[in-house]
Amino acid sequence: MEYDVAAIIQGYTQGYFLMADDSNNLGWYGSNERTLIPLDERFRYPQSLQRVLNQERFTVAVNRDFLGVVAGCANREITWISPELEKIYWLLYQAGYAYSFETWQGDKLAGGILGIVIGGAFIGESMFFNISEGSKVAMVKLVERLRQRKFLLFDAQMMNPHLARFGAYHVDGEEYEVLLKKALLTPCALI
């Protein structure tokens, strides 16, 4: 099946995201409420994680093992990342839109975050870990990177208890559109 990368990116720029349903049918989804990860002082994390960060047990990399991160994100009992969506992520990666932000422990992939970068927006698709704390350290280090690179928006799409611990918050659809439009006009680079 042939995919049009420009059309897919257009969907993301309009505030939609791709997900597969229980039958692996791929579709575009939107929401009246979006979850954002703060890129300011509202970003927080547990003190126990600060101890892990101080120990420097993990190193970070971008796109060192993109397919490994996609596979890690898809490897769960209930997943919205179908084989078709994995192929789309690979195409977006080849076109310079999809990224994996990774933590490593030695030569072992510890965890990672899969996302789409358009302008100053990082649209988080999924995250996973192979080693305890791997994805949490990835989150902290990714926020640091997004701040350094002057990104305006870290869209996490949907809330969960894990994201709430980092200060994730909801915005309504209207506010999200305003923030997204501003971010899309801001040239940024993750690497």
Image (cartoon, rainbow, N blue to C red):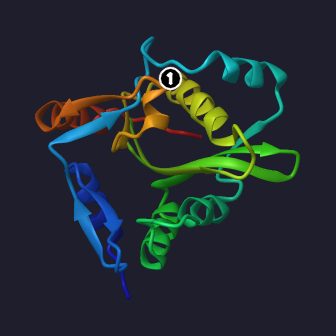
The quarter of the picture where residue 152 lies is top left
Task: Name the one closer to the observer, 31 or 115.
Answer: 31
From the top left corner, tell me how far across and down residue 83 is, in percent: 48, 78
185 up-or-down from 29: above or below: above
| Three-letter amino acid code at the position of disc 1 | Arg
Q: Is residue 14 left or right of residue 47?
A: left
Tell me what residue is drawn at x 55 percent, y 64 percent.
76
Q: Is residue 40 left or right of residue 145?
A: left
> Which residue is label 1 attached to?
147
- Judged from the image, the secondary structure of the residue bearing numbered disc 1 is helix
Task: Name the one closer to the observer, 172 or 185.
Answer: 172
> On the rendered image, what quadrant is the C terminus found in?
top right
Which residue appears farthest toward the left when viewing the image?
A: 174
From the top left corner, tell me how far across and down residue 185 is, in percent: 28, 35
From the top left corner, tell me how far across and down residue 43 is, in percent: 47, 19
Task: Name the one closer to the observer, 115 or 43.
Answer: 43
Tell me what residue is drawn at x 48 percent, y 75 percent.
87
Which residue appears farthest toward the bottom when viewing the image?
A: 1
Tell me what residue is drawn at x 79 percent, y 18 percent.
54
3 up-or-down from 38: above or below: below
From the top left corner, tell me how far across and down residue 156 is, in percent: 39, 41
> On the rendered image, what quadrant is the N terminus found in?
bottom left
Q: Is residue 52 left or right of residue 70?
A: right
Which residue appears farthest toward the right when viewing the image?
A: 106
Label 1: how many Cα within 10 Å (few below 14, some 14–19, many 20+): some
Q: How many marks?
A: 1
Which residue appears farthest toward the top when viewing the image?
A: 41
